[in-house]
Amino acid sequence: MNIHYTVKLHNPHAHTFKITLTINAPDPEGQVLSLPAWIPGSYMIRDFAKNIITINAKSNNKFIRLEKLDKSSWKANTTDSPLIIEYEVYAWDLSVRSAHFDMTHAFFNGTSLFLMPHGLEVEPCTVEIQPPQEQKYSDWKVTTSLTKQDTSASGFGSYQALDYDELIDHPVEIGTQTEFDFTVENTKHSMALTGIHRADSTRLIKDLTKICQTHCTMFGELPKLDEYIFLVMVTGDGYGGLEHRSSTSLMCSRDDLPLENQPLDPDEKYRNFLGLCSHEYFHTWNVKRIKPEGFLPYDLSTETYTRQLWAFEGITSYYDELALIRSKVISLESYLELLGQTITRVLRAKGRLIQSIAESSFEAWTKFYKQDESAPNTIVSYYAKGALLALCLDLSIRLKTNHEKSLDDVMRYLWINYGKKSIGVPEGKIESIISDISGIDFSDFFKNYLYGVEELPLQELLAKFGVSYNLRATISADDKGGKPADKTTSSTSSIGARFVENSLGAKITHVFTGESAELAGLSAGDIVIAINDLQVNKTTIQSFINNYNEGDELTIHAFRRDELKVFKLTLKAAELTTCYLQVNKTSSDEEKNHQDKWLYP
């Protein structure tokens, strides 16, 4: 094998890996190497090379010159003998995107550790993961979907990959993780839980099997896999996921995991975890294999722009929760609550009236993944609004074809004709495929809702499926929507800002366009300490506001930096941006039939 990597768990106290890369036949004109600037699935330049602490090159047991070309790449002097690159990597990012190493575990993505030898990207390679030397780590093991070549019972040893793209698409967890297996489509699936937890593995197996099978049934098959692994880092307060070709990296709070003897219908936290698992598993087809044309191959040195993330993330976000009810893991009421929360998130972002979903996709690199205090007023999420666009497409196709066609057919077509054949999807092609499969001209739909900023026809479409669409005012900062307001609680006015706790009072994180706080001159970063001469904090500020009515004038004392300012704020009516959905009790038989075919096809 021409290319070989060795991974040594060098110093858990300093959080460092030591990597050795051996290239037996390097470029005779001088081997160029680089580390990716971003990781597929997370569209932001992260410059992983910044974590390389030391690096040197050897050949024939002698050091040779290694010139740094730019922030992420190096060039070794010419040699006609094997080239050895040795380097240390700092790993202290507890996330699904990078690498983390301490006395409790080691986790890494290949994009954080493995230098890419230019010109040799398509060559096969091997990786040796060495066990830690200290006795206190003797019970550590390796969990990864990388193909085993020669490994011990604990997983340490040699792995192989067909090329660099495959090498970096199998994250690795090393430690004392809890593992359990289940089977879907005659393929081994497993979950590895890292961290302190008391999760009910029996419940997880039962629910995940149903969810994964639902996705396989919809697509018609599972892609050819040796196995699939859910790698889960369990923390006190975490959430996130990143898809890979035969595994996913997840992070969750330990409270998100089910305990024994919990109710059959998952609570909100466990439901969200199942939705996360469902989302990343759906990516096994959509984005890992059905890809934008510009992603074949990935250029990991710079941004790769596409206007199609609404389809690859938005459609995935639609199906991740839809699969929960189709698999009967959650109830209809629970699904409608989730859908209402998604609608609420979109309605509360005034950026939906400024930025189209297609623009949001294209500008993911500079806006969605780099949000600041202006984000709610200037951008829209291609995840959330993309999911609602997918919902509208699915319901529209079903209505106009009497359920002979649906978005399911579109996804199966994309899998068979693009994903399965490793053909990238050109820009704009998905829109034409939807029109071709449904036999309906959706050009105006996409013009208005994908490339334009018109409000989606949610109320009209859901009504035809026996679901009523209701809007109300937001009750508190913790109000996610999805449910009717408590009858004892009412809110007719709003301050028009979002807060976090601060030792002095309530710190403003966001001020919403055209609402009371902005009109009064308040800004993000201001710390509100008193209203009408009474002290407030994040917990009390909303209940304080609820005691006043639209048109009332309030005196706000706030610190801007270290200067005390006084603002006169006139309360405006609370906007009706919190949504909840309910089954229409007066639905016709036709509407009930539409609902059943949509949710239980």
Image (spheres, helix red, strand yellow):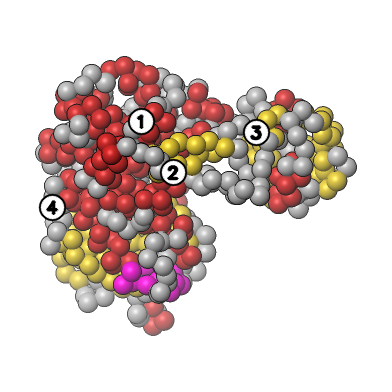
Q: Which residue is mark 3?
A: 574
Q: Which residue is mark 1?
A: 461
Res. 484 in view: yes
Q: Is residue 196 magenta?
A: yes
- The residue mark sitting in front, 4 or 1, is 1
Report how far apart the C-alphas of labels 4 and 1 lie in the structure. Answer: 37 Å
Which element is circle 1 on?
Answer: helix
Task: State yes or no: discs 1 and 3 in contact (Cβ < 8 Å).
Answer: no
Question: Is residue 468 depicted above or below 456 in this figure?
Answer: below
Give percent across and percent down for residue 180.
Answer: 28, 71
Res. 344 in view: no
Q: Give the number of the disc on residue 582.
A: 2
| Mark 4 / mark 3, whichever is N-terminal | 4
Which residue is found at the position 50% from the left and 69% from the top? 13
Q: Which residue is mark 4?
A: 224
- Which of these two is toward me, 323 or 593? 593
Report how far apart the C-alphas of labels 4 and 3 lie in the structure. Answer: 52 Å
Give percent across and percent down for residue 386.
Answer: 37, 34
Which residue is found at the position 15% from the left and 65% from the top? 149
Q: Does residue 570 appear left or right of residue 275 in this picture?
A: right
